[in-house]
């Protein structure tokens, strides 16, 4: 079974891929209900999940996208743009 792994506040939980929409809604609502760094953390997690991430670490803002997914393509574009700007 494919899963989504999410870390927030040093706690890691795994969820089935079938719950992606519910997780996006949960973290989006959490971002709206919180403020400051907690809101930022929840927004980051929701954004990564909506782009197809399979692993998200909200504590240090890292993520893993399946190769060839929309998120992976965007990640490579960001890296390329960064190096072109130096």
Image (cartoon, rainbow, N blue to C red):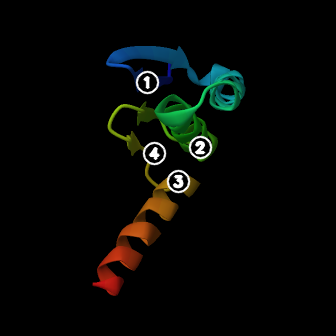
Q: Which residue is mark 3?
A: 71
Please tell me whether mark 2 sits on a helix, a strand or a loop: helix
Residue appearing at x 47%, y 34% in the figure: 37
Q: Is residue 50 left or right of residue 85?
A: right
**Residue 56: % across, % down:** 43, 34
Does any portion of residue 66 appear in the rendered image?
yes
Number of residues whose C-alpha sits closer than 10 Å to that of mark 1, classed few (under 14), some (14–19) or many (20 or more) = some
Please tell me whether mark 4 sits on a helix, a strand or a loop: loop
Q: Which residue is mark 4?
A: 66
**Residue 14: % across, % down:** 45, 16
- Give the camera-side residue of 29 and 16: 29
Q: CA distance from mark 1 to mark 4?
A: 13 Å
Give the mark nearest the N terminus, 1 or 4: 1
Give the mark nearest the N terminus, 3 or 1: 1
State the image quarter where residue 42 is shown. Answer: top right
**Residue 66: % across, % down:** 45, 45
Q: Nearer the viewer, mark 2 or mark 3?
A: 2
Number of residues whose C-alpha sits closer than 10 Å to that of mark 2, classed few (under 14), some (14–19) or many (20 or more) = some
Q: CA distance from mark 2 to mark 3?
A: 10 Å
Q: Which residue is mark 2?
A: 47
Q: Is residue 40 left or right of residue 62?
A: right
Give the mark nearest the N terminus, 2 or 1: 1
Q: CA distance from mark 4 to mark 2?
A: 15 Å
Q: Nearer the viewer, mark 4 or mark 2?
A: 2
Number of residues whose C-alpha sits closer than 10 Å to that of mark 4, classed few (under 14), some (14–19) or many (20 or more) = few
Q: Which residue is mark 1?
A: 5
Give the mark nearest the N terminus, 4 or 3: 4
Give the mark nearest the N terminus, 4 or 2: 2
Residue appearing at x 52%, y 35% in the figure: 36
Q: CA distance from mark 4 to mark 3?
A: 8 Å
């Amino acid at each position: 079974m494919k899963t989504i792994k999410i870390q927030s506040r040093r706690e890691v939980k795994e969820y089935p891929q079938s719950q992606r929409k519910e997780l996006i809604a949960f973290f989006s609502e959490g971002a709206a209900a919180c403020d400051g760094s907690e809101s930022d953390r929840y927004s980051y997690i929701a954004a990564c999940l909506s782009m197809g991430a399979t692993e998200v670490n909200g504590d240090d803002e890292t993520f893993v996208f399946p190769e060839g997914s929309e998120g992976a393509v965007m990640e490579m574009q960001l890296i390329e743009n960064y190096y072109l700007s130096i």
